[in-house]
Image: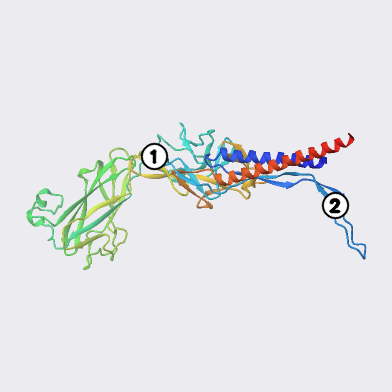
Amino acid sequence: MLRSLFSGVSGLRNHQTRMDVIGNNIANVNTVGFKSGRVEFKEGFAQLMQGASRPPGSTGGINPVQIGLGSEIGSIDTLFAQGNIETTGLNTDLAIQGESFFVLGKGAERYYSRAGNFQVDAQGKLVSPTNGFTVQGRIAINGVMQDPIGDIQLPFGQATPAKPTANVTLVGNLDASATDFDKGTATTLDALDPIQRALPQNASSFMDASITAYDSLGTKQNVKVVMWKVGQNQWDWKVDPSNLNITGSVTEVAGTHPIAFLPDGTIDTTGGYAAPVIKFTPADGANDVQFTIDPSGGALGTASGLTQYAGANNAVLHDQDGYASGSLQGFTIDRSGTITGTFSNGTQQALGQIALADFNNPGGLTRTGDNMYAETGNSGNPVVGFALKGAQSELTAGALEMSNVDLAQEFTNMIIAQRGFQANGKVITTSDQMLEELVSLKR
């Protein structure tokens, strides 16, 4: 009789535990990155009343006779199913789509979380707002990712170095129907001479193209290239030094004179053709500037670069690859977790990349509070990688993963737990009534 009382008590205790887990799930229905729990019961110890016997020969064997002594908690599992993604628009909010975890650090300690509601602290570190633990990843220096993995810190207030111009692109058209440049009464032909340029016959025989280049200190240099027709399908070129703030003169390191064009209007690349390369010394103390003027448009000898067709002169120095120094103004985070900074000089540069961790058995992690987990002996060691490379997950910036609690399922589980608790309570009251009846036999 007492066995049924103890079985009922164990059932009450276990269903109360299940109700505790259900209550915790419902309480965290709006907790960012929360993963719901689930209680599983197992049968308790069974008392052996009579052992099994083998068949003696002409008769059959006898099965064991056992009485169960109630139930126990088999496991309380954490369900790591994907939660819904909610858009927030805040670029430091990150949601993981996949099975990975964010890695956060507190000194040498490492913790793991699915909650991506991060913020930037006063030192530029990307941290969890609940406890200040720092998001882990790798930092980029001058756009190049560095190892090992450590605290993510954004370089607010720091300047990115200037990059001197190394390549300038010359594209467009030179007028094939133009007459040769005429020096008039001048002794020497000079396409920079205002008097020669003003002659009516030279109206379409020359063209100017300008662009702003940069030296190693980020100082702007106004580069001007003059081109003029010297013969059939031939145009010569020269750099005008008048607008350059330099010491000395402009040096031509390389370059074909004049540039010849084929009958189809494209540059003649035969006969040792070389693109113009110029060099000069800035007056501000910067390193010598040397850059190539590339008239190919990326495909030498095709109509995508500098051409000579009948029509207006519209050749321009289209682009250059230098820039001045700049300070960090903002940043974005892409699907791979790469943090890209936008600088005041109009450039963009990688600042770092957020690390992700995977576990062989995520269910083996232990909850430590603040939406975080710690590894255990049964979770396995973390495999640290990066989204879309190593980790089979991706990040969504400006969004958060919400709780994966299913309210409909939790309310259903609540009814089941309540009825189970009532049934076990009924076992106790019935056993009590039977014991009362047994005691009353003495009367």
Q: Quadrant of the C terminus?
A: top right
Front-most of residues 389 and 115: 115
Amino acid type at image mark 2: Val
Relative to 48, residue 151 above or below: above
Q: Is residue 53 left or right of residue 209?
A: right
Relative to 221, residue 184 above or below: below
Q: Is residue 441 left or right of residue 213?
A: right
> Dot 1 corresponds to which residue?
330
Mark 1 to mark 2: distance in Å? 74 Å
- Residue at (52% x, 45% y) in the render: 355
Which numbered mark, 1 or 2, is in the foreground of this view?
A: 2
Mark 2, Cα crowd under 10 Å, few <14 / some 14-19 / many 20+, is: few
> Dot 2 corresponds to which residue?
65
Q: Quadrant of the N terminus?
A: top right
Which quadrant of the view contains residue 25?
A: top right
The spot of residue 7 in percent (x, y) is 77, 42
- Marks 1 and 2 close (CB-CB < 8 Å): no
Q: Helix or strand or loop: what does disc 1 sit on?
A: strand
Q: Which mark is residue 297?
A: none
Which quadrant of the view contains residue 15?
A: top right
The spot of residue 98 in percent (x, y) is 53, 50
Mark 1, Cα crowd under 10 Å, few <14 / some 14-19 / many 20+, is: some
- Residue at (37% x, 42% y) in the render: 342
Front-most of residues 191 and 168: 168
- Residue at (26% x, 65% y) in the render: 268
- Residue at (83% x, 50% y) in the render: 66
First of labels 1, 2 by sequence position: 2
Q: Helix or strand or loop: what does disc 2 sit on?
A: strand
The spot of residue 439 in percent (x, y) is 86, 35
